[in-house]
Image (cartoon, rainbow, N blue to C red):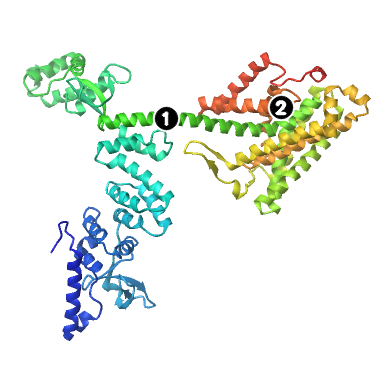
Amino acid sequence: MQGTEGVTPPFIIMLRSLCLALLCLSVPLLGPACAQPAPTPIEEILLQNSDLIEESSRRTIEPAIAALSESGLPEAADVMIMWRDKELWRRKSDGRFFRIEPTDDRDTYLMKSLVTGEEIGPIGRRDVDQIKPNSGIRGLIDGALVQFQLTDPNPSVRRASLDSLARDPSADQLPILRRAIKNEAEPGIKAQMARIERLLTVRFDEDIEARIEAIESFAGDLGVDVRATLNPLLTTVRKAIREDPDTENVAATLTPGTDAFSYDAAYDFLVSQDLAPKTINAAARDAAIVANIENGSVAGIPVATLDTRLARDAAYDKLTENGAVSPALTEAEREDLVDTFNFFDAYREDPQITEAVLGTIGAINTKVRLNEMADLSLDALSLASIYFLAAIGLAITFGVMGVINMAHGEFIMMGAYTAYVVQLFIPDRTLSIIVALPLAFLVTFAAGVILERLVIRWLYHRPLETLLATFGVSIALQQLAKNIFGTQARPLTAPDWLGGQLVFNDVVAISYIRIAIFVLAIVFFVLLLFVLNRTRLGLEVRAVRQNPRMASSMGIDRERVNMLTFGLGSGIAGIAGVAIGLFAKVTSELGQAYIVQSFMTVVVGGVGNVWGTLAGATLIGFLQKGIEWFNPSNTLAAQTYMIVFIIIFIQFRPRGIVALKGRAAEA
């Protein structure tokens, strides 16, 4: 007996098994046949579909999978998993299915019960066949397992099943998912189920009202999965009809003769739709003439006279009149034929569906643009914090001392290499960064003091000589770094807790390293303000900056202040190098990538002003990201436009955004 769908009812399966067991008990002569348990109900289903299972064809296997999944038997899921994982074996003698385990004897396997896993006995290796489903069948089995996995007691299994369902959805899974939602108790999983159910409703539900409701529920949703579901609903098909397309769901009309849709393209489309005869070019006409040569003439025209294009076309027209060949349309005739048709692209979906999709995608796109602006702002703030760290040391030396230090980028490079060396001795990434920050400051502070004592102090008030001298020092430091560390980029690995990114939605995200650099920039900004405004050194620095002669008359050691100021600026550059090295390649040229931006930041913000440096870094960061957003494919052009803008900006505000006032501005 078979059910309405070709599946034997469970009670019939159980009845057969019971009869076979009684037969084995009542007929001792059948001992060998009854040496193992009678087939269980799940085995009966496998036996009924053994031919399909053994054939392993994706086109024919679905009834066997359906029989297992719809049997209602508790072990059905385990058997399907064994089948998918190629752990199902079939005995050749009677077609029974078993589990198999290898033994010490390479020619013998150990049979086990399919349901209980109990040992049945040995069997020869050649007496069984392994069922090996291909990838297509395994995919069908995975789809059928969804109904079991969605109700699994283990939440992780249910989540994994939902992820699998989202990757490979089908219409069959929609009712299964709706039943699972009703029984789901965990709020997070239930919300995920409800979201996937709406996505499946959009794609597969036959009720247009239900689809429209599901589509409209995603208005403003930034999920990539939503756009991946909605966009295919706006696919179009090109059509050409003679009547007005009033009843069609028109996406766009096409006008023949325009650049986007020429007459040739329109006619070729008509040919592809069997609405117009194929174009017969000159070569094809000549071939037809050759094929119709009889007794040295074509349609009564001597071949010797067919030496011009006009003569051959006349011969072809004669063949057309005789019905020997198809007529060749002239260009004017083709255009006249094209003009009798209306060309348009039509949506494949129902007009109500496309209207709902267009409205929802419009709302999504509006929100996407707003979030893209937010994401761009985060990128700009991140870049501004990097420029601020790189430029704040230069702002101190340039602003207070008037020294154009072309080696400032090499102090950034020294800080990055210091962090790299620290990581060689301290494997713990977090501890190494904690140690590297103050150590990079000390190393570059000392290097700055040495540079100031040996070179800078002899060149005060001689800016050209200072520029050339520090440029030479820059080249020397780069070569020294190459000699010590080589030309290959060295890795500076961030701690694990700085890996990944903070994701707000599918559009807005920022890496944790960028957040850490932003926080570091804020910390140093506050710390520098404290040093300059609340410490004796800061008081002396401000005094020297505002009126060097008066500061000297008040007993302030200008040389000591200049030395410490230059060292402080260099030390901050070293800390910037540690931060930059966490995401950039640590090479001898690392600092060169930031020296130009550092000078621009100081000049635009206002020389010698911490607040001005912050404002300049913010302006340049936002400006660069804004230009890159308009021209993302050419970063070099973006840099050029930014420099041009800054040149124009300085023409109108030469003292920068936050200009110094009083004696400091006159110095």
Amino acid carrying mark 2 in the image = Trp
Image location (x, y in percent) of residue 338: 20, 18
* Identity of the residue drawn at 14% across and 25% down: 288
Instruction: Please state the horizontal and vertical placement of residue 477, each as a whole percent of the image.
Output: 74, 37
Task: Classify the position of the N terminus by image quarter.
Answer: bottom left
Which sits in the foreground, 582 or 528? 528
Q: Secondary structure at mark 1?
A: helix
Q: Is residue 347 left or right of residue 304?
A: right
User: Crowding at label 1, few (<14), some or many (≥20) Cα neighbours within 10 Å?
Assistant: some
Which mark, residue 611? 2
Q: In the figure, 91 relative to 612: above or below?
A: below
Query: Where, by quadrant of the figure, is residue 553 drawn?
Result: top right
**On residue 365, which mark appears?**
1
In the rendered image of this protein, does residue 29 appear above or below residue 180? Answer: below
Residue 552 lies, in percent from the top left, at 91, 26
561 relative to 61 in the view: left or right: right
> Which label was assigned to residue 454?
none
Q: Position of residue 476 (x, y in %)?
A: 75, 36
User: In the drawing, does residue 345 fall left or right of residue 657?
Assistant: left
Query: Taking 156 as reference, is 286 left or right?
Result: left
The residue under the point 51% across, 36% down is 508
Of the numbered discs 1 and 2, the one sitting upstream in the chain is 1
How dense is the environment of label 2, judged by Cα within 10 Å: few (below 14), some, or many (20 and up)?
some
Examine the rendered structure and indicate whether residue 222 appears above or below residue 645. below
Residue in the foreground of this view, choosing between 417 and 382 = 382
Quadrant position of the C terminus in the picture: top right
Q: Is residue 621 visible?
A: yes
Above or below — where is 323 with respect to 388? above
Label 1 to label 2, Cα distance in Å? 38 Å
